[in-house]
Amino acid sequence: MKALVTGGAGFIGSHLVDHLLAVGEEVVCVDNFLLGKKEYLSDALVNKNFQLREFDLLDLDTLDCLFREQNFDIVYHLAANSDIQQGYEDINVDYKNTFLSTYNILCCMKKNNVKEIAFASSSAIYGNHTDILKEDSGPLMPISNYGAAKLASEAYISSFCECYNINAWIIRFPNVIGWRLTHGVIFDFINKLLDDPNQLLILGNGKQTKPYLYISDLLDAFDIIIKQNDSKVQLYNVSSDSLSNVNFIANTVINLLNLKNVKISYTGGNIGWIGDVEKFYYDTSKIKMLGWSSTYTSDEAIKLSVKKEIAFRHL
């Protein structure tokens, strides 16, 4: 099979590229390197089954040329703005980089008769629900531009599946962690403590509580999900069944960096930024019926991710 991976030089994308190559697939990666790094693809770049193309998915002509040149069997569409705060500050960011990029991919799939897409969606599409989140939870009322753009992308994917006979697997990620990070709380805490090892400012009150999923568990979920063909649109929540809070992450980073007497302070409030949620929890019974469950608890995933990221950076 030949796969297109968008955002393939990012954190999740680069791991997915390595995973697909390891099982013998041909992979073409497209990335504009706003967040992704070429060094994350160091192993892939020496693999004869890998191609790297550097351009923006908003460049529809170049994207269409790529589709005409290659005979893709499937698209793994991961490219998006992953910074919710940036999307709040600039309203064009998520419209262009999260939604319009998806629309362009779908147009090229239709035009070039590519029939399968695996889409990286997010818990942000649910908004600020207090109940356990199921795939059919509603109403879906995002509270961030990022979540709105992901939900709009899901809607367009669903429409294209029905109108143009495309098959889609929509995977709603939680907080996915590991190494080669480009953003997120672990990434931010490490950077802050490298800049000033004596103090750490935490956004909110540190009690924000969410599930964290280790990258290898996500890749295992991908393998299982894309084998399902019960309907044109397959929708799955993927997550560990446990929760961790921001204070735990802060203390884990401090301890594994071997720092002492770090002064922790807080900006206050129940959330870290506009568009954040205080707590969410996934119902994962649907994917568990396929035989998948996370190898690592949320706390275990955090500890392993911090260790791996520190080692990756040679700290």
Image: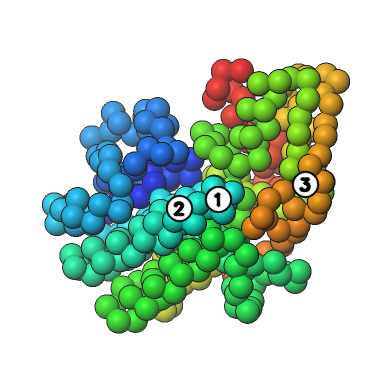
Residue designated by label 3: 204
Q: On the picture, is 70 further left or further right than 272?
A: left
Residue 233, given in percent of the width and then of the height, sits at 42, 75
Disc number lying in front (1 or 3): 1
Displayed quadrant of residue 41: top left
Residue designated by label 2: 93
Tell me if mark 1 has few (under 14), some (14-19) or many (20+) residues whose alpha carbon lies within 10 angstroms of its own: few
Tell me if mark 3 has few (under 14), some (14-19) or many (20+) residues whose alpha carbon lies within 10 angstroms of its own: some
Displayed quadrant of residue 126: bottom right
Nearer to us in this view, 277 or 211: 277
Q: What element carries label 3?
A: loop
Q: On the picture, is 25 further left or further right than 156?
A: left
Q: Is mark 2 on a helix, strand or loop?
A: helix
Residue 16, given in percent of the width and then of the height, sits at 43, 45
Q: How far apart are marks 1 and 3 (CA)?
A: 18 Å
Residue designated by label 1: 89
